């Protein structure tokens, strides 16, 4: 896991398209007429001091990415993705733990209410760092319900 420099923005944008396509069945997001999904705040991860982009690597191969936001009162895992071939191998867990260590304090992670695979992943990862984490269903500004885990690192 490493910081993603600005020259890797295009790489993350490509990974983001696959990630958003996978998640569309849970989020209801539709591709635009050009077949691409919108993620209008991606550039801010290189332009704003409170936002951070990471590449997840195995040896030299990029196998995923993470976007993290520092907000009032803590840190939020905005997006996190490991490519399908590398899931269930421990790489995502290790990468998440590395990211958590870089931002000690309060954290929040959220998943679509219907994405039981992501919920299971995050519950297991978070239990490693805070067995007393809290979880509840919240409705976002977009009107969609999601599972939100809050914990301390």
Image (cartoon, rainbow, N blue to C red):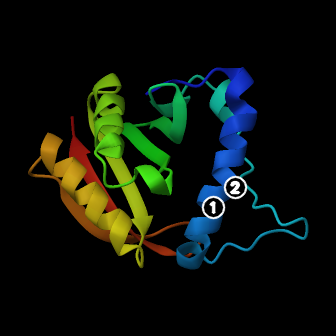
Q: Is residue 34 left or right of residue 55?
A: right
Q: Which residue is mark 2?
A: 17
Q: Which of these two is toward me, 27 or 139?
A: 27
Number of numbered markers: 2
Q: Residue sitting at 59 percent across and 25 percent down? A: 4
User: Is 12 left or right of 92, judged from the image as shown?
Assistant: right
The residue lying at 31 percent from left, 55 percent from top is 88
Q: CA distance from mark 1 to mark 2?
A: 5 Å
Using the image, determine if residue 116 lies above or below residue 63: below
User: Are the residues at dot 1 and dot 2 in contact (C-beta closer than 8 Å)?
Assistant: yes
Residues 68 and 134: in front is: 68
Above or below: residue 30 compared with residue 38: below
Callout 2: few (<14), some (14-19), or many (20+) C-alpha neighbours within 10 Å? some
Report the residue at 78% width, 69% height from top.
31
Residue 81: % across, % down: 49, 50
Rendered-image quadrant of the N terminus: top left
Pinpoint residue 57: horizontal percent, then vertical percent: 47, 31
Q: Residue furthest left?
A: 131
Q: Is residue 12 above or below residue 33?
A: above
Residue name at image x 42 percent, y 79 percent: 114
Q: Does the image show residue 73?
A: no
Q: Answer with the quarter of the image where residue 111 lies.
A: bottom left
For label 1, count other residues whose C-alpha is less than 10 Å away and answer few (under 14), some (14-19) or many (20+).
Answer: many
Report helix, strand or loop for mark 2.
helix
Q: What residue did someone put label 1 on?
A: 20
Which quadrant of the view contains residue 46? top right
At which x and y percent is residue 12? 66, 39
């Amino acid at each position: 896991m490493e910081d993603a420099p600005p020259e890797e923005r295009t790489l993350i944008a490509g990974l983001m398209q696959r990630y958003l396509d996978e998640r569309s069945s849970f989020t209801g997001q539709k591709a635009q007429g050009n077949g691409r999904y919108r993620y209008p705040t991606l550039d801010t991860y290189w332009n704003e001091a409170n936002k951070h982009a990471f590449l997840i690597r195995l040896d030299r191969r990029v196998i995923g990415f993470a976007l993290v936001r520092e907000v009032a009162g803590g840190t939020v895992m905005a997006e996190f993705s490991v490519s399908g071939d590398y899931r269930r191998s421990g790489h995502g867990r290790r990468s998440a733990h590395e990211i958590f260590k870089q931002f000690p304090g309060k954290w929040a992670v959220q998943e679509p209410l219907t994405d039981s695979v992501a919920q299971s992943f995050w519950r297991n990862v978070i239990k490693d760092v805070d067995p007393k984490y809290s979880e509840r269903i919240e409705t976002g500004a977009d009107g969609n319900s999601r599972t939100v885990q809050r914990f301390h690192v």
